[in-house]
Image (tube, rainbow, N blue to C red):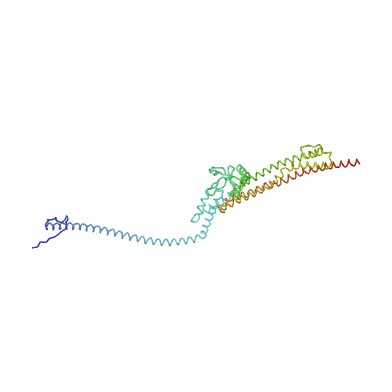
Amino acid sequence: MATLALTLPHGPAFAQEGTSIKDLLKAVRDENSGDKRLNQEREKEFRANLEKLRATLGRAQQERARQEAATTALETTFRENEQALTELEARLTERQGNLGELFGVFRQVAGDTREKLRGSMTSAEYPGRIEEMDKMAAAQSLPKVSELKLLWETLLGEMAYTGQVSKFEAAVVRTDGTAETLPVVRVGPFSAVADDKFLVWKPDTETLAELERQPPSRHTAAASTILSAAPGEVVRMSVDPSRGTILGLLVSAPDFMERVDQGGLVGYVIIGLGAFGTLILLFRLLALSTTGSKMRSQMKSNSPNMNNPLGRVMAIYEQNKDVDVETLELKLDEIIIKEVPSLERGLSTLKVLSVIAPLLGLLGTVTGMIVTFQQITLFGTGDPKLMAGGISTALVTTTQGLIVAIPMVLAHSFLRDRSKSLVQILEEQAAGMIAQRAERESSGAGKSV
């Protein structure tokens, strides 16, 4: 009888080497029985989970149906509401009529009023109006009656404020940047003063600020007067109808010393020459006036006085009474010629100054234009301020040269006429002396005959 050999893999469930077939069969049966129980338990669990999933599916389907029904109802409501909204919008448009144009005009007027108030000095006394106008200008709906009344009231108020002279307390920004509450007098929307100084309205910060540089004293004096004026009193006041533009130009205009500085070195030289010429003019005018007064006194006296040219001429005549007429005439001419330089002293200097001054002005003009063209070469013509220095030198030196030259020409002409009149007196007196001497000689010769 043949023997069947069975080869099995090694494992814990199988019989080890030397185990009988019966034991192996039993082990296999036990294992199959355990797997069967495990599968039954798993199947039971799967069935329980299936029932739960079916119940969950049913609830989900019911919820889906409910949501679909709700969606259908909402869609129906949405269509009905959309149709109703269309009808209401059509009815609103029909009932509004020209109110749409009113809304546009209202916003435009509110925006224009806001900009006018922002630039008006009255906003320093009546703040808060700009914010209201901002809200009205940005409105997205038709204005209310209260808003229309507020806009109307604001416009009428601004019209009234522009015709008032008002005194109130306000914060004023000083030139050093500090703010201080001061009594402010406002003349309409044109001018405002505080602490004897003119103020300017800053629309960006909505504040009053002192001018960095005040106008001339006649305007600040008016500011001081109106600050101390009693209610109802009529006083003089400087008003800027351009609301700050003219005042800004007035304070930005250079004063005398700044004009002088603009002339540079050439300008100072011209001023020095003018001062030197003025000293010569005063000195020579005093000298000629004194000499003329002494000569007029000498004309009334027969005794010569050596402190004046006419006295010295008469002294020469007295010293040479015994000489002939021709010799006397020559001696008198000689003394007159010696006296003329002292009478005409300084005239040539004034004449030279009157010529040099405009030439120096021309030199400053050329120098200034050279600087201007150099700046144009470097920076172009985009910024006129860069060229202002050279142009100022060019114009100011020309003006300074003419200002000095014209009085020098007049002074030279005046002093020349004065000196000529004194020389003419000397010549007339000398001619009279010679005529008297010749007449006496002629009379003596006739008697001797």
User: Quadrant location of the N terminus?
Assistant: bottom left
Q: Where residue 416 sits in the image (x, y, percent)?
A: 74, 45
Image-quadrant location for residue 229: top right
Q: Residue furthest right?
A: 449
Q: Nearer the viewer, residue 401 or 231?
A: 401
Nearer-the-camera pick, 166 or 5: 5
Residue 91, position in %: x, y?
47, 61
**Total numbered circles:** 0
**As rendered, which of 414 and 276 lies closer to the eye?**
276
Give percent across and percent down for residue 324: 84, 41
In the image, taking residue 366 as reference, residue 435 lies left or right, namely right
Residue 120 locus on image (x, y percent): 56, 50
Report the side of 267 relative to 132 (left or right): right
Q: Quadrant of the C terminus?
A: top right
